[in-house]
Image (tube, grey):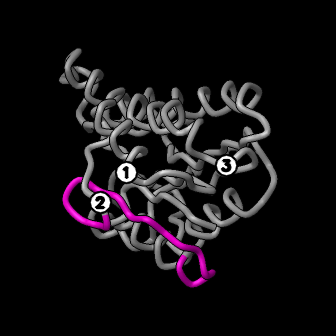
């Protein structure tokens, strides 16, 4: 398959890229500052330009999405807007613009996270964004068939516990290799409208 991987140079994106290449897929990597192509997917015009550059693909996978983490009392309207722009609208644009560039039985795989279903202190904006992405996936799935759409919703990565473990007390971490396998399941499988929680 020819796969467009957005957010390909981050911790998760790198793991997904390695797994897809190992499975003999042709992967076009995208990020703001590296990869095969450099685009900022928070800008809808750049998303449209990205697809014009890439052309037809079998699948689109997103491993990109940024949200602010602050105590609820410190979160501003701008912080919530940043979360929605950075994780929700950017991925919605990847789907909307990609509908005419993904083959009829192709797929979209988006990224959410555990905070859609579990709360942590400082995670309100992330919870809002993750929940919105998951709701969008379920709604889009019934309208874009035969194209498919799923979301990957991991907890904290085992490889990131040193940096983020204290924010996720008592939550079992998940290895990046397992998360990458969930992307494979979404891309190579046949399910749609699924939230793969890890």
Task: Tell me which numbered mark, 3 or 1, is placed earlier along the sequence.
Answer: 1
Which mark is nearer the camera, 2 or 1? 1
- At a point 53% along the width and 39% down the height, the residue shown is 98
* Secondary structure found at label 2: strand
- At a point 25% along the width and 37% down the height, the residue shown is 68
150 sits to left or right of 67: right
- At a point 65% along the width and 66% down the height, the residue shown is 184
Q: Is residue 123 above or below residue 64?
A: above
Task: Tell me which numbered mark, 2 or 3, is placed earlier along the sequence.
Answer: 2
Residue 140: x and y, percent?
A: 66, 28
Q: Is residue 17 magenta?
A: no
Is 137 in front, or is 99? Answer: 99
Read off the magenta span. 21-36
Disc 1 packing (10 Å; few <14; some 14–19; many ≥20): few
Q: Is residue 194 above or below residue 4?
A: above
Is 167 in front, or is 131? Answer: 131
**Can you identify the residue that label 1 sits on?**
53
Q: Is residue 25 magenta?
A: yes
* Secondary structure found at label 3: strand
Residue 42: x and y, percent?
A: 30, 35
Real-space CA distance between mark 2 and mark 3, rounded to the nearest whole angstrom: 21 Å
Give residue 37's mark: 2
138 sits to left or right of 66: right
């Amino acid at each position: 398959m020819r796969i467009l991987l957005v957010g390909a140079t981050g911790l998760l994106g790198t793991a997904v890229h390695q797994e897809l290449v190992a499975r003999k897929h042709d992967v076009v990597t995208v990020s703001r500052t590296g990869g095969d192509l450099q685009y900022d997917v928070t800008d809808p015009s750049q998303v449209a330009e990205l697809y014009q550059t890439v052309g037809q693909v079998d699948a689109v996978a997103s491993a990109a999405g940024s949200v602010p983490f602050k105590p609820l009392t410190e979160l501003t309207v701008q912080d919530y807007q940043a979360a929605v722009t950075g994780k929700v609208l950017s991925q919605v644009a990847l789907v909307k613009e990609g509908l005419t560039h993904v083959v009829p039985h192709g797929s979209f795989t988006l990224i959410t996270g555990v905070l859609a279903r579990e709360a942590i202190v400082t995670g309100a904006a992330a919870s809002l964004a993750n929940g919105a992405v998951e709701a969008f996936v379920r709604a889009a799935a019934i309208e874009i068939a035969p194209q498919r759409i799923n979301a990957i919703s991991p907890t904290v990565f085992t490889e990131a516990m040193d940096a983020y473990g204290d924010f996720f007390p008592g939550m079992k971490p998940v290895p990046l290799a397992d998360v990458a396998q969930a992307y494979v399941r979404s891309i190579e499988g046949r399910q749609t409208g699924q939230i793969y929680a890890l």
